[in-house]
Image (cartoon, rainbow, N blue to C red):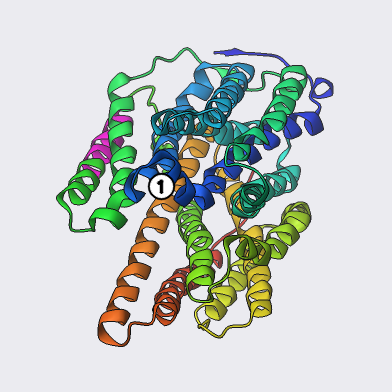
Amino acid sequence: MNTVPNTKQEIKTGPIMAALLVAGFVGLFSETALNIALGDLGRIFNVNATTIGWLATGYFLTLGILVPVTGILMQKLTTRQMFLTSILLSLIGTILAAAAPLFSVLLVARIIQAAGLAINLPLTQNVIFTIFPPNKRGAAMGVMGLVMLAGPALGPTLAGLILDTLSWHWIFWVTVPFLLFSLIFGFKYLPNVNEIRKISIDVLSVILSTIGFGGIVYGVSVSGEVGWTSPIVLGTIIIGLAALIIFSIRQTKMEHPMLNLKAFHSPLFVLGVIMSFITFFNMLSMLVVLPMYMQMALVITAFTTGLILLPGSLLNCLLAPTIGRLFDKYGPKAVITPGTLLVAIGYGLYSQFGTDTVLWTIVVTHIVMMLGIGAVLASVQTNTLNSLPKQYYPDGIAITQTVQQVAGAVGIAVMVSILSAKQNSYVAAIANEPTHAAASGSALVFKISLLLAVMNVVLSLFIKKPKL
């Protein structure tokens, strides 16, 4: 086993975090920013809604496929090699997207962008857990939580502003200077902090992982267009699950597995993974369904929708480091349980919204919701990974990040399908009133999310601080 030596004095945590988190913000911003422009892009490139949707689906699919592979790459390549690969992929993808003359070029560019983010997210967590001692990880992960929330949440707002004043190309061009900043800072300050191991990549494991996670993400992503009973949807999900079972069995029998599933021997890790799945399932579907509710049931513009959601997102950004410090000082349960309660209260209020809901109540409810998610998101991840021995960090990070991406893709597909089904049944059985139908569908989605949020409240009662 070969390690690259570093002294504590050489590691400048501020510039390192800046390089990693700015790149992560750009990737997560790009994940949702383009969604608001999909209608316009469909007309510009003369493609149908299903085809243009691949700009979002392809992004999720790439993350679902590549994130599990980063667990083993982080053990084979140095920190700097991983970082530079991530940034260069993000830069190439972004510039290619901004200049794309054809839909096919834009789609390829989105996949390259997603590949950069798929490396960045696990790498950032691994660096945090390596350069920060356990008593300071909460604050560091709190800042990362800020980025993970701010990127997707601010994406539609900023993109709406850009589309109102400039062309869609600028959704990409505006992020290039930030990626160049990350490249320069990372090149100058980021040391090699991980352990390099002489292990070979098992090709069959990579194939099984790709089919498994890719099949599930693809199946749920296209379900909204072709229906859950479609042979394509059922077939890809079943094949994906079968591949994952074979993949898991293979990992337990290998001397050097691609993904070490021994992390699941820790009850706290399992608890954290379940809570992360519920949190990301609810959060990413909420970031899609809530704007749909406001635009269809309340008939307000996309840009106004973004402005309504902005206070909650900004307040969460401001408080994220404080939440992290509270985690370090008082322990996980003192932060996570109140956070899950706030999320449950938020969904309880969302589920009561109708066609006559006043906008200030949405602003207040969203603030409550985002404060809760901010308290839960980073704190659960920190506690989950703290429960593992250091040698399992790359595997634990790869597992949790994969679970989060799959949960997000599944959450969006399931909740949007439920919303659409409820809308259609309302129109067929009650009245052809689109605004009331949208409100009815949204209320059902938020009631389901409320049940899941209550499950997280109960699970949080079993959270405890690992013995480090």
Q: Residue at x 33, y 82 (%)?
A: 432
Measured as percent of width and height from the top left, residue 292 is found at 48, 66
For residue 190, what is the image quadrant?
Answer: top right
Residue 324 appears at what percent x and percent y? 73, 52
User: In the picture shown, does residue 241 fall above or below 77?
Assistant: below
Q: Residue at x 68, y 63 (%)?
A: 307
Q: Nearer the viewer, residue 270 or 150?
A: 150
Q: Main secondary structure of the magenta part?
A: helix
Name the residue nearer the viewer: 367 or 270: 367
- Does the image show residue 343? yes
* Count of numbered badges drawn on the protein: 1
Residue farthest right in this picture: 9
Q: Is residue 289 magenta?
A: no
Q: Looking at the picture, which amino acid does disc 1 mark?
A: Val
> What residue do we see at 68% from left, 48% from top?
165
- Left or right of 411 in this view: 83: right
Look at the image and tell me in which quarter the N terminus lies.
top right
As drawn, the residue found furthest toward the left would be 231
Q: Looking at the picture, how far across and down is residue 378, in whole percent?
A: 63, 51
Residue 466 visible in the shown view? no
Using the image as rendered, state which of residue 364 and residue 50 is in the foreground: 50
Q: Regarding mark 1 in the picture, which secondary structure is present there?
A: helix
Classify 150 as above or below 425.
above
Q: Which residues are magenta?
A: 241-253
Extreme bottom residue here?
430
173 versus 86 height, above or below: below
Q: Quadrant of the C terminus?
A: top right
Where is mark 1, residue-wise? 406
Q: Left or right? Give the position of 156 relative to 316.
A: left
Question: Residue 418: x and y, percent?
Answer: 34, 68
Residue at the spot 28% in from the left edge and 31% down from the top edge = 208
Q: Residues within 10 Å of mark 1 (few under 14, many from 20)?
A: many
